Amino acid sequence: MTDIERKMADLAQRFATRAVEEREALTGSLASGDRAAIVERAHRLAGIAGMYGHPLITDAALALEASAERGLAMEASGQRLLDLLSGLESA
């Protein structure tokens, strides 16, 4: 494994470890209906997840971001993202 591969693997592991905190924060934002916080968090998660090879999380985060921005219901897209983050926690 090269140095770059090791660094990327380390960063990916840190992202997986942070999934617990991300999930908790997102749960709070969804419960309060804070669309601005949801847009910001979902946008950031989409970018980070994409960099570390989690396209399903990227897609779910982008769907949630779009729903929040458009004033649409966020329950389904929010739950999908929460479920995917839970999957990282247990991986």
Image (cartoon, rainbow, N blue to C red):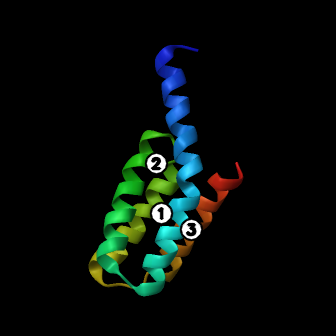
Is 3 placed above or below 67 here? above
Is 67 placed above or below 85 here? below
- Please, what is the three-letter code of the amino acid marked with disc 1? Ala
Is 1 placed above or below 15 here? above
Between discs 1 and 2, the one toward the N terminus:
2
What residue would you read off at disc 3? 82
What residue would you read off at disc 1? 60
Classify 10 Å Cα crowding around label 1: few (below 14), some (14-19), many (20 and above).
many
Q: Residue shown at 34%/77% (left/top)?
A: 68
Q: Residue shown at 56%/68% (left/top)?
A: 82
Q: Looking at this view, name the residue that lies furthest to the right.
A: 90
Instruction: Kindly report the distance in space between the C-alpha atoms of the residues bearing marks 1 and 2.
Output: 10 Å
Image coords of residue 15 (percent x, y): 52, 46
- Please, what is the three-letter code of the amino acid marked with disc 2? Ala
Q: Quadrant of residue 6?
A: top right
Between discs 1 and 3, the one toward the N terminus:
1
Q: Nearer the viewer, mark 1 or mark 2?
A: 2
Q: Nearer the viewer, mark 1 or mark 3?
A: 3
- Which of the image's four quarters has the N terminus? top right
Image coords of residue 73 (percent x, y): 42, 85
Residue placed most toward the observer, 10 or 65: 10
What residue would you read off at disc 2? 49
Residue placed most toward the observer, 80 or 5: 5
Q: Quadrant of residue 41?
A: bottom left
Q: Is residue 65 left or right of residue 86?
A: left
* Mark carried by residue 51: none
Q: Residue shown at 56%/56% (left/top)?
A: 19
- Please, what is the three-letter code of the amino acid marked with disc 3? Leu
Q: Is residue 71 left or right of residue 21?
A: left
